[in-house]
Amino acid sequence: MTMRILVTAALLLLIAIPTIAASGSASDRADEPVPVPEPSDEAMRYYHSGNVLWVVNALWGFALPAALLFAGLSARMRDWARAAGRKWFFTIAIYAAIFTAVTFLLELPLAYYQGFVRPHAYDLSNQPLGKWLGDTFKGLALSIVFSSQV
């Protein structure tokens, strides 16, 4: 019984302390507007190019699997996976690994522009190409492992 009371009291304190701490200082500044600086031309170009990249990624995300399917490459990958895996579980895992690798290679130019060229053009990154490629291929390796597990 006493343990239940102590836990309840601790939870109430955890809920009440941030509310009490914030109530004094926030009420003093509640009427003041927050100053927001005007965006620069470069910030607006970055924002608009980000919107364009979002649309391109969304369209590419639909077009790439459809192209793989309708071109017959997906069936070839399935046949390779079936020949290598023999059992249905291994066939699915191998197909997922092949599909992940193929889509990675086809998406690499867009990922290079979006993840390396664009941040460097706006001075948002100083990562060398070798490090970027290393990180990208580490991500591929993790994607292959996890897509094969599912």
Image: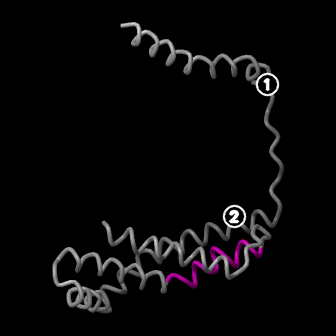
In the rendered view, would you say 113 is above or below 43?
below
Identify residue type, mark 1.
Arg
Identify the image quadrant of the N terminus.
Answer: top left
In the rendered view, would you say 42 is above or below 64?
above
In the rendered view, would you say 100 is above or below 29?
below
Label at residue 19:
none
Position of 90 compared to 96: left or right?
left
Q: Residue at x 70, y 75 (%)?
A: 118
Depth check: give the residue in front, 109 or 6: 6
Give the percent coordinates (x, y) of residue 78: 25, 86
Label at residue 29:
1
Q: Residue at x 38, y 68 (%)?
A: 146
Element class at badge 2: helix
Give the quadrant of residue 115: bottom right
Disc 2 target residue: 47
Q: Is residue 25 magenta?
A: no
Give the percent coordinates (x, y) of residue 39: 80, 56
Give the percent coordinates (x, y) of residue 117: 70, 79
Q: Is residue 112 magenta?
A: yes
Q: Residue at x 60, y 78 (%)?
A: 134
* Span of residues in magenta: 107-121
Depth check: give the residue in front, 44 or 7: 7
Identify the image quadrant of the C terminus.
Answer: bottom left
